[in-house]
Amino acid sequence: MEDFDKLSILQLDALMEIANIGAGNAATALAKLINARIDMSVPRIDIKSFAQVPDLMGGADVPVVGLYLKVSGDAPASILFILAIERAAALVDLLMGRENGTTNHEGFSDMDVSALMEVGNILSATYLGALTIFTDLKFYPSVPAIGMDMAGALLNAILAQLGEVADQVLVLKTELKRDGQGVVGDFFLLPDPGSLEIILGALGVGELE
């Protein structure tokens, strides 16, 4: 399995550049969807073990909303976008132009869930689109699945579906803003074994050391 700790600064910079381009494209797509300006950025990329992911949410017992997609193609992977449930509600408020605190995170409506799934679609499509432009690799994301549970339980359910994956994940801290109202979530890329080296090779920044 790949060891992301072996990524060089050059390799991380290349992935960061792609993430920021994807974020810019996602902001444009969301702005068209809701007819309002959206700012989006990826202030940093982290490398974490999969076991550390619940800690990013505040612990395994924290209620979260997770959007999960399987990516097929030249470099298969999985994508996961996770927000603490209160942040998911704030994201719905942001997208719908509601006052922050309006959406009840204990009872998302069908429209709220649809909005969250569309964010997952747009984030995945734009990030993978940026990867395709830079690498000429083909990626085909699945329809997103949404889950609401404790962070630990949600991640265990996803792991049960994944089978063999890298021990570590790339975490793209993702910030969305509208009219000064901001929401931060975590966007995870989990390459299948061998996929990260394919991506890095296509980017021209070499293989893992």
Image (tube, helix red, strand yellow):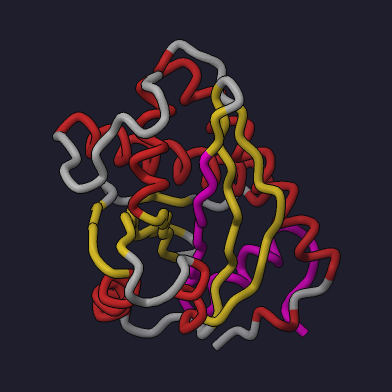
Residue at the outermost front position: 101
Kindly indicate the quadrant of the structure image that contains residue 168: bottom right
Residue 75: horizontal and vertical position, in percent? 50, 64
- For this view, does 44 lie left or right of residue 72? right
Q: Tell me which residue sits at (26%, 45%) in the image.
A: 105
Q: Tell me which residue sits at (60%, 56%) in the image.
A: 172
Q: Tell me which residue sits at (61%, 26%) in the image.
A: 180
Q: Tell me which residue sits at (56%, 17%) in the image.
A: 37
Residue at the outermost right position: 10
Residue at the outermost bottom position: 1
Q: Where does the magenta region start and end?
A: 183-209
Residue 87: horizontal and vertical position, in percent? 42, 47
Does the magenta segment cover residue 64? no
Q: Is residue 105 above or below residue 92?
A: below
Kindly indicate the quadrant of the structure image that contains residue 33: top left
Residue 204: horizontal and vertical position, in percent? 78, 60
Quarter containing the N terminus: bottom right
Q: Is residue 156 above or below residue 189?
A: below
Of residues 88 and 75, the one drawn nearer to the viewer in this rendering = 88
Residue 124: horizontal and vertical position, in percent? 45, 46
Quarter containing the C terminus: bottom right
